[in-house]
């Protein structure tokens, strides 16, 4: 029986005309059998720091008042061998020229999801992929993404891509962790510096990952994997 992994995917500033040039798409993945244990650990960390177990971890909520919690969460991620992150940053969506490639922005969006997941997926394993519900088109996007990933991986029976399922971020501790790590990656690549607490989280990420967050890592980097993608293909 093949090993089963849960993959929690999130995205930020992915819309074509949102006036936000920097886009990020990311995933945290772990063995399915350990998901409950890890989720309980994160809930326990919330309680330890005086937060409700229902407190939702979000990059936009990082502040000085909860800084110790967020720093400890980063430490937990790097201390847990079975947790892995991959993030893809598009530094400037304004440079996209879809017409040159005979594609729509939606077509490109699905390609980016494939770019995100292709370094994660092992055809000898099975994956349950969870995506954050964003808008009224979420089910349409889920079905299309499932079709694209199975076709790209010659997975007509669904043996590798077991499922792609929509969930709300407050339902999953690990999805919330994805939001945090992706948010830090995007904030850093936007060159923002208005929040001392967010800069402290980024500094801890750089220390623990030994990565600048500005550079593409080795494609098979297993713990904290980054791709800075540029229009026209390739990496930065």
Image: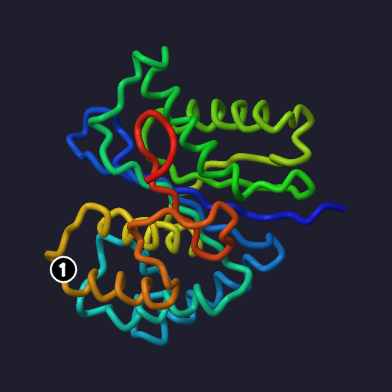
Q: Secondary structure at mark 1?
A: loop
Instruction: Tell me the quarter of the picture where residue 137 sits.
Output: top left
In the displayed structure image, the side of residue 38 where residue 138 appears, left or right: left
Residue 211 pos. (x, y %): 40, 67
Question: What colour-coding does the image apply?
Answer: rainbow
Q: Is residue 172 visible?
A: no
* Residue at 30 percent of width and 74 percent of height: 203
Relative to residue 8, is residue 52 depicted above or below?
below
Relative to residue 34, is residue 95 depicted above or below?
above
Residue 164 pos. (x, y %): 60, 40
In the displayed structure image, the side of residue 150 where residue 139 appears, left or right: left
Nearest the camera: 147 or 231?
Answer: 231
Instruction: Find disc 1 in the rendering and name its residue.
Output: 195
* Residue located farthest toward the bottom when viewing the structure as drawn: 48
Residue 90 pos. (x, y %): 34, 41
Residue 106 pos. (x, y %): 41, 24
Relative to residue 183, is residue 153 depicted above or below?
above
In the displayed structure image, the side of residue 191 where residue 206 appears, left or right: right
Label 1 Cα crowd, 10 Å radius (few <14 / some 14-19 / many 20+): few
* Residue at 43 percent of width and 53 percent of height: 216
Q: How many marks?
A: 1
* Residue at 55 percent of width and 52 percent of height: 219
Q: Is residue 76 visible?
A: yes
Instruction: Tell me the quarter of the picture where residue 204 sits.
Output: bottom left
* Residue located farthest toward the right when viewing the structure as drawn: 1
């Amino acid at each position: 029986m093949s090993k089963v992994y849960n993959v929690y995917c999130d995205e930020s500033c992915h819309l074509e005309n949102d006036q936000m040039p920097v886009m990020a798409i990311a995933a945290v993945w772990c063995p399915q059998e350990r998901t409950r244990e890890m989720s309980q650990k994160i809930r326990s960390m919330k309680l330890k720091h005086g937060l409700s177990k229902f407190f939702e971890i979000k990059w936009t909520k990082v502040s000085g008042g909860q800084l110790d919690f967020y720093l400890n969460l980063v430490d937990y991620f790097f201390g847990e061998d079975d947790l892995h992150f991959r993030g893809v940053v598009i530094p400037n969506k304004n440079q996209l020229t879809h017409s040159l490639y005979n594609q729509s922005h939606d077509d490109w969006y699905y390609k980016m999801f494939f770019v995100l997941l292709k370094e994660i997926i092992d055809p000898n394993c099975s994956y349950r992929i969870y995506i954050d519900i964003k808008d009224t088109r979420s089910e349409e996007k889920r079905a299309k993404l499932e079709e694209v990933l199975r076709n790209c991986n010659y997975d007509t029976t669904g043996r590798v891509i077991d499922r792609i399922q929509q969930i709300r971020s407050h339902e999953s501790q690990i999805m919330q962790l994805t939001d945090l790590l992706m948010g830090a990656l995007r904030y850093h690549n936007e060159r923002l510096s208005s929040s001392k607490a967010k800069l402290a989280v980024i500094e801890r990420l750089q220390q623990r990952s030994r990565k600048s967050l500005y550079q593409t890592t080795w494609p098979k980097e297993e713990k904290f994997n980054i791709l800075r993608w540029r229009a026209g293909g390739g990496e930065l």
